[in-house]
Amino acid sequence: MMSQLVIKNLEVTVKDQKILRGINLTINEGETLALLGPNGHGKSTLLAAIMGNPAYKVTGGTLELDGQDLLKMTPDLRSKAGIFLAMQYPSEIPGLNSADFLKSAMNAHRQKALSLFEFYNALQNAYKDMGIPFEMSKRNLNEGFSGGEKKRNEMLQMRLLQPKIALLDEIDSGLDVDAMQIVAEAITKEQKRGAGFLIISHYARLYNMVHPTKAAVLINGRIAVEGGPEIITRIDTGGYEWIKDELGIEIEKEEGGPMNTVSIGSCATKERMDNGNK
């Protein structure tokens, strides 16, 4: 049976402020959805709400994975059901050994615990694939890791847990070219396994590497546009101004710097981009 994440009319409030105002999206097994939109319009809020972060209060709508009501599940149960979130800013957890954490997480997703041999074999292969020295498995989770190491460590967790649907919140931000290639290869392997993806990125480079099957643009807490990957190209070359011109949607707020040839930045217009490329 094909796995499917179905989001219907989802409304989310943060600190009494409504952020999401009726999101409708479906992600099927084997699909990769690129989620675009200006900063501050609800992309990260959507991912946090799907994962069950208690700071994000769902005030309306439904979230279902394979017919299961995710809203009735705690974050750990959502993880066991097959949802994975790679965070934009992974936390450092002093006192928690990385290998112990990974072993506990893997066993929590299995009916029968891994043998020590099975675990270390999987762990060594995953560290090798992610280009992380195996010695780092002995360190506390993310403690003293660089930004790039934290991001690759998130992908290492995904590699070991093999989720049905992976949510990636700017997993490529702050990565150099080599690290981004490693992250893209990890995503590609999971795509081939059949995992579905919801990916937030401001960089066309990552999308070019992982080849999304569809794209959606989140504006003012709603999905303004949904379609094929050609949307990514259009935004990368022309910003978001066309959404206002063609659909009559006023962008309530825009943050960040202008787009350029590398970044699907958050608030560029075609005019700004043309000026920046002269």
Image (cartoon, grey):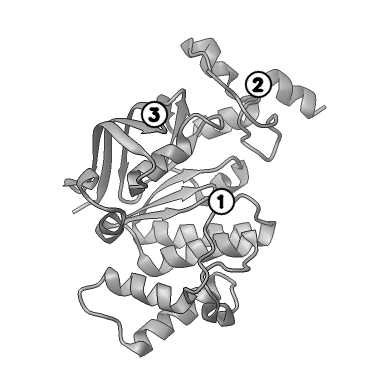
Residue at x-position 52% and y-position 78%: 137
Q: Residue at x 55, y 11 (%)?
A: 245
Quarter-wise, where is residue 254 in the image?
Answer: top right
Residue topped by disc 1? 209
Element at badge 2?
loop
- In this rendering, would 52 be left or right of 202? left
**Earlier sequence position, callout 2 versus callout 1:** 1
Q: Amino acid at mark 2?
A: Thr
- Tag 1: residue type? Met
Pointers 3 and 1 in contact (CB under 8 A)?
A: no
Task: Report the amino acid beneath label 3.
Answer: Asp
Measured as percent of width and height from the top left, residue 146 is found at 65, 63
Q: Quadrant of residue 101?
A: bottom left
- Which x, y percent locates residue 5? 28, 44
Q: Report which residue position mark 3 lands on.
A: 16
- The crowding category of the residue bearing disc 3, from other C-alpha atoms within 10 Å (few below 14, some 14 to 19, many at least 20), is few
